[in-house]
Image (cartoon, grey):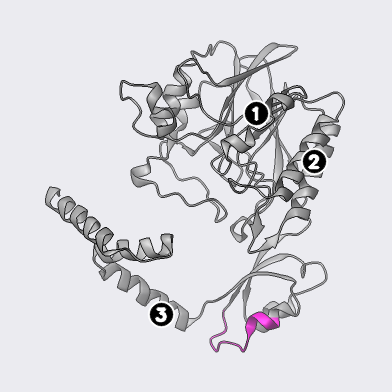
Amino acid sequence: MRFFHLSDLHIGKQLCNYNLKTNQEAVLSQIVAQAKEKCPDVILICGDIFDRAVPSGEAYTVFDRFLQELASLQPQIPVLIIAGNHDNAQRLNYASSFLEKHQIYLSASAPVQQEERLKKIVLSDEYGEVNFYLLPFLKPGYVRHLFPDGKICDYESAVRAVLEREEIDYGKRNVLLSHQFYTNSGQALERCDSEQPVLSVGGLENIDASVVENFDYVALGHIHGAQMVKFPYIRYCGTPLKYSASEEHHQKSITMVTLWQKDAGATVDVIPLTPVQEVRRERGLLQEVIARANEKNRHDFLSVTLTDEKEPYHPREQLEEVYDYLLEVRIDNTRTRNLMRGQEEREFSMRPMELFACFYQEMQGQPLTAQEEHFIETLLDEGGEEL
């Protein structure tokens, strides 16, 4: 059985206030064209369909057109979709019953009632049946009430418990769609600046890949760079577009998987995707960066770091004369490095309460109230006594 593995479309996303609609429509059209040419048996989309929980009307239109184009292909290709952490379950699940008539299957939320189970889609090929289990993004609190014995204490125990209650027959071929943060014994994955930052205390968000290693293929979403986790068949496919300068050297692609008979493994191939505009970094003296502009690269999304010791006059304005899409302009010289070093030293010497107050101000855009400050001081004092 052959299938496309996609994730993290982030339809509606902007790149430093630049609208990406044209770029996203172009890459989605390439996916449709490749589906028409390669004729996969099924297409998997593993979460973060939209970039925000309340998508714009424009974002809905882009996704609707994408689904219509896929549904119009002959022979018709089933499409399996799960929600990611950016998606709103209720909004994504709208019209799901109607979509199933066109072989588009959505799973927007984890089981809520005791009688509910994961959505399971069974497809067949020359080797027999393949069971596709759709596991949308979940937090421990979403499913804790299903396990009154108190076994749910973190993300890993939540996913493990949800999968165990499915009583999956691993003697058959099984594929899992999941949108979570999986690691190999806690080893760091390649992360991108475009991924939503998550405050994870003690690695509670991590799920060890051993939880899902009995599946024949695990189609993952959440991480924006394509990579495997522990085994080649447990894989993040990455985003179809570059959504930050940190992805400059990524080759975005469709992950195409061929699943053979049971215990024969899976073959993974990549189909390159070509962006309308590249996302690049430029570094050097202002005049050097300006001199490197040409008709081919001047329309790229550009992050610039200038190294002039004597900071130039209005550098952004000068750069905008030759580059159309500036994401940011940074200065990296002796003065800025000294300022940064001083800031790090100041933060290192700050009291825990001062650090928390700065963090709160940055996250909430407002200072702590006197009552909140007293509450945090009390917690810190109690914590210090326990240590």
State how far apart marks 1 and 2 are (Cα).
Answer: 16 Å
Q: Earlier in the sequence, mark 2 or mark 3?
A: 2
Discs 2, 3 touching: Cβ within 8 Å: no
User: Is 308 in the magenta?
Assistant: yes
Q: Nearer the viewer, residue 93 or 312?
A: 93
Across and down, in percent, residue 174 comes to: 59, 18
The quadrant holding residue 187 is top left
Q: Earlier in the sequence, mark 3 or mark 1?
A: 1
The quadrant holding residue 19 is bottom right
Across and down, in percent, residue 10 comes to: 65, 47
Quarter of the picture containing the N terminus is: top right
Amino acid at the residue labelled 2: Arg
Q: Residues within 10 Å of mark 1 (few under 14, many from 20)?
A: many
Disc 1: which residue: 106
Residue at point 55% right, 89% down? Answer: 310
Viewer-nearest of labels 3 and 1?
A: 1
Range of residues picked out in magenta? 307-318
Residue at disc 3, secondary structure: helix
Across and down, in percent, residue 355 comes to: 30, 64
Image: 92 above or below 147: below
Q: Nearer the viewer, residue 98 or 34?
A: 98
Using the rendered image of the protein, determine whether residue 180 is visible from the camera's viewpoint: yes
Task: Return the mark for residue 366.
Answer: none
Discs 1, 2 touching: Cβ within 8 Å: no
Amino acid at the residue labelled 1: Leu
Q: Say whether residue 245 is left or right of residue 144.
A: right
Amino acid at the residue labelled 3: Asn
Residue at disc 1, secondary structure: strand
Q: Say whether residue 41 is left or right of residue 285.
A: right
Task: Return the mark for residue 65.
Answer: 2
Image: 147 above or below 241: above
Disc 3: which residue: 338
